[in-house]
Amino acid sequence: MSTNATEFDRARAAMPGGVNSPVRAFGSVGTTPRFFVSASGPRVTDVEGRDYVDLVGSWGPAILGHAHPAVVKAVQDAATRGLGFGASTPGETELAEIVEARIARDCMRPIEKLRLVSTGTEATMTAIRLARGATGRDLIVKFAGHYHGHSDGLLAEAGSGAATLAMPGSAGVPAPIAAQTLVVPYNDLDALREVFAARGDDIAAIIVEAAPANMGIVPPALGFNAAIADLAHENGSLLILDEVLTGFRVGPAGWYGIDPVSFTPDLITFGKVIGGGLPLAALGGSAAIMDLLAPLGPVYQAGTLSGNPLAVAAGLATLHHLDAAAYERIDAASHAIADATASALAAEGVAHVVQRSGNLFSVQFTDAAPTDYATVKAQEAFRYPPFFRAMLEQGVSLPPSVFEAWFVSAAHDDTAVSQIIDALPAAARAAASATA
């Protein structure tokens, strides 16, 4: 029988680092990655036949639980009709209509038209191209610690000052491309105002995670999204709201629907849940902006697999089953796990905060709640690897990085939640005994 170790050896011989996405290598948690062969409900099973309660959920899209019968059947039915046509299908239109109707609050619907793509990276990349086409400007503002996919212009690191052009954040990113991005500390309106005072006439758009979940959970300050929307619009720029992680996850209308202060984004990007676990993403906005995309307008975007019928079927089935009862189950399980995590760490005297954005949450090993990337990085991150390994040994699969959100599904029943809670005291002890 294969083991996780032998599978990892085999994978490293065939693929860079043995993985097709870096976090899967478990490098930051100091153990062998698990190779999963099946999943059902709240559980995943590795090549050694061991089951784990899963708090990764394919990084979000398994919001109903793994292999939900209705989603599986929808994909199977679609497959019998053909894997793809390279042509339009009625399902694409149906999904667009559902998204347009679902993203609403205060009688406002910011999405009048939607373009389906295959990945979150493609959605944000296209949104930026569209913003530049709409404004005739080149510069993009992003926030330190926010991840919007791996396109060149968004893998940028902060320069020496708020209004300083960014530097490449990865080998292979040309400096002139990185220099089209300005990187600002998150939750810092004064820094953002400084950027617009210096470069406002050149800024096409601000791109922001609706509620950041790629540096752990760092909620936006009250009214922050509304303030940056106002600042963008006052300067003739657009606001791109990245809901790849939060869209349909934290509520029926994503973070846009539950932010305590109403605001108006110009473009919204989606991924994860919208595809129900298959490769699908989207961007949407007003008809005036979206119609700048080809074939109507001058901004080009195309994709052979955009709106693939299997992915569309999975997305439709997922959204159809994400009703109020499903969100109630997700929210209840999330709060129970988050509260128990905080209690277990407190009992062992471990400095920590558990930050939440709706039903997304994460643990940060620090006394004060981080508000930006600098304070996130200042935590005692060395406590997470032993915490992670202790949970894994007890059959609980957490995200293999302290800088990730935990994902709960509607399938996390009382048995699954109890197993997680029962594993926490030993993991808290492991975190307490960790040394840098």
Image: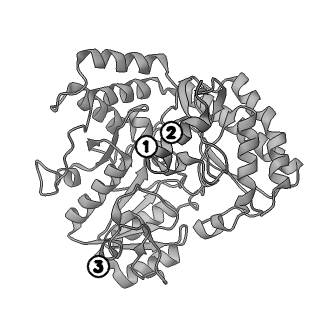
The residue shown at (36%, 21%) is 75
Closest to the observer: 168 or 46? 46
The residue shown at (20%, 70%) is 136
- Residue 233 image offset from top left, x and y in percent: 34, 67
Q: Earlier in the sequence, mark 3 or mark 2?
A: 2
Quickly name the residue at label 3.
201
Residue at disc 1, secondary structure: helix
Residue 162 placement, left or right of 111? right
The label number, if any, that marks residue 299 in the structure image: none
Quickly name the residue at label 1.
14
Residue 20 position (above or below residue 169): above
- Residue 132 image offset from top left, x and y in percent: 24, 65
The residue shown at (55%, 67%) is 187
Q: Amino acid at mark 1?
A: Ala
Quickly name the residue at label 2.
10
Q: CA distance from mark 3 to mark 2?
A: 53 Å
Front position among marks 3 and 1: 1
Residue at disc 3, secondary structure: helix
